[in-house]
Amino acid sequence: MNKFTALVMTLLALLQFSCAQISGGPGSAPTGSAGGVVVLDIGHFTGAGGASTPGAVNGKRISECSWWYQYAYYTKKVIENAGYTCVVTNRGNRPTDPTLAAYADRAGVVQLNHPDKNAARYPSKYHPDRVASGMVSADYAISRKAACVVFLHHNSSGGWTSGASPSLIICNKYNGGRLADCLARTMEARILNHGMDNGGRGCSVSVRSKDADRSAGWMNACDDSGIPAAVIECAFLNNRNHANFLADDANARRYAEAVGHGVVKYMREHGSEPRHIRENEDKADEGSFGYAAESRSLNVPGAKRLLH
């Protein structure tokens, strides 16, 4: 190799390095990558535990947040055993209860230390026209360029204390459909009516795209960055059949592992597929900034422009 060829090759290498640095400039939203981590987010936080059983079930009272602190480890283990990197997060502070703190340590929970008390809602750091409670968890997934993010919840409803419950997976509009379908089909194959009585019902998939519809705001933020997102709402804690099933440790592990198998199914079958990215932050997307009242007090780019 002569000196001129070597010089040209060096210059090309320097140019490629410079372009790589520029492409991820400050303020730009990271986009989802099939090679990124799988993020599991424990819904709610200690002190505001979400859905719960109406009374003692098998000697226990269950809240969804504390339940997932105990069992997210098993979901994570399935995903890691399949060869993927997995991180468990929670928007709240480290639990003060010693037992829950031990579970958090076992699962390696990343505490985001931002509990949204009194149902406070916040704009996304990356997509400021998206506002929701729990937005810090979505922003963490975006910052990690997550391959997908699954929000770990349980459901409850006053009308489903007995009999079959409408188990479902909620997903974001553009990128979450295949993830939700893999989770739903896996829960049907392993859990629903396979130990956990669901009256013969399957598991439906529901898309949320209007920010004002509870979880849609933070799932839309993930969508904007090309990250498939889904919320697990397969078990109803005030349904006695479901609560009794989940109160048994062996059953609980099997349920948590089934969620992990659903994630692995998605990663293996669809993890490398192209993603939909929101390319124009200046153009309002469907459902953007559903909370007009909050937007008036939020001095963030795009907030006033997207007032309803």
Image (spheres, rainbow, N blue to C red):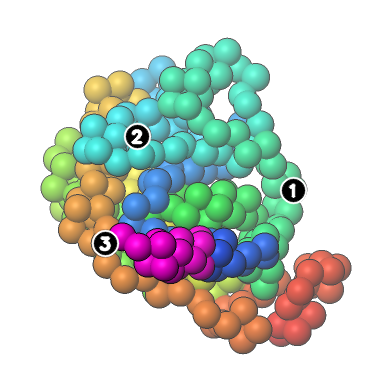
296 with respect to 272 (left or right):
right
Q: Residue at x 55, y 34 (%)?
A: 110
36 with respect to 137 (left or right):
left
Q: Residue at x 25, y 53 (%)?
A: 267
Q: Which-is-in-front pick, marks 1 and 3?
A: 3
| Nearer-the-camera pick, 243 or 158 | 243
Circles 1 and 3 in contact, beta carbons < 8 Å: no
Q: Which-is-in-front pick, marks 3 and 2?
A: 3
C-alpha distance separating marks 3 and 2: 20 Å
| Nearer-the-camera pick, 276 or 118 | 276
Residue range highlighted in magenta: 1-17
Residue 72 point in image, percent of width and height: 39, 32
Q: Secondary structure at mark 1?
A: helix
Q: Secondary structure at mark 2?
A: helix
Residue 43 appearing in the image: yes
Picture quarter containing residue 83? top left
199 with respect to 109 (left or right):
left
Question: Magenta-highlighted stretch: main secondary structure?
Answer: helix
Query: Of marks 3 and 2, which one's residue comes earlier in the chain?
Result: 2
Amino acid type, label 2: Lys
Picture quarter containing residue 125? bottom right
Q: Residues within 10 Å of mark 1 (few under 14, many from 20)?
A: few
Residue 262 point in image, percent of width and height: 24, 48
Query: Of marks 1 and 3, which one's residue comes earlier in the chain?
Result: 1
Q: Is residue 217 above or below residue 145?
A: below
Q: Residue at x 52, y 38 (%)?
A: 89
Residue to which mark 3 is pinned: 272
Q: Residues within 10 Å of mark 3 (few under 14, many from 20)?
A: few
C-alpha distance separating marks 1 and 3: 39 Å
Residue 90 point in image, percent of width and height: 55, 38
Q: Which mark is residue 76?
A: 2
